[in-house]
Image (cartoon, rainbow, N blue to C red):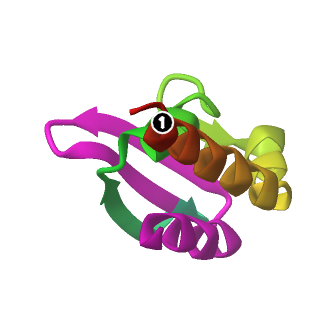
Amino acid sequence: MKELERIESSLKKSNTLLYKQDDKGLACSFVNGGLVVDSFVIQDEVIAEALAKKGTNGVVEGSTFNMLRSNYDWFSLHVKSKKLYDTLKK
């Protein structure tokens, strides 16, 4: 769950998220004032899918970004629940 912790940390330091699907996973760049604050690849499919649903055309900004940041506990709980469900389903 280190990816969830890193997302939370990056959300606190930025005001825009740019993401793009690549061969390794979901490449994310957290931007503040036009500068990239943090950049990494999310390899976990459940986290990547949930985060990608938050944005439009590879961007999470404005009120959508602020909602993600302020409700991050719910987002994290949703992801953890989905991962647990997928584990139990197998």
Q: Going 42% across and 56% down the picture, which residue do you hit?
A: 29
In terms of depth relative to the viewer, which is nearer, 37 or 54? 54
Indicate whether 62 appears above or below 35. Answer: above
Q: Is residue 34 visible?
A: no
Q: Going 34% across and 36% down the picture, which residue do you hit?
A: 20
Q: Classify the position of the C terminus by image quarter.
A: top left
Indicate whether 62 appears above or below 74. Answer: above
Q: Which residue is mark 1?
A: 86
Q: Which residues are magenta?
A: 1-30
Answer left or right for 33 relative to 57.
right
Answer left or right for 24 relative to 60.
left
Q: Going 84% across and 47% down the picture, which residue do you hit?
A: 67
Indicate whether 84 appears above or below 3. Answer: above
Residue 22 on image: x %, y %: 21, 36
Answer left or right for 68 relative to 47.
right
Residue projecting furthest to the left: 23
- Indicate yes or no whether the magenta region holds residue 43: no
> In the rendered picture of this protein, how many numbered marks are placed on residues?
1
Q: Going 55% across and 73% down the picture, which residue do you hit?
A: 5
Residue 63 on image: x %, y %: 84, 41
Residue 50 on image: x %, y %: 56, 36
Q: Is residue 50 visible?
A: yes
Mark 1, residues whose alpha carbon is within 10 Å: few (<14), some, or many (≥20)?
few
- Indicate yes or no whether the magenta region holds residue 15: yes
Residue 81 on image: x %, y %: 65, 46
Q: Which amino acid type corresponds to the residue marked 1 in the rendered image?
A: Asp
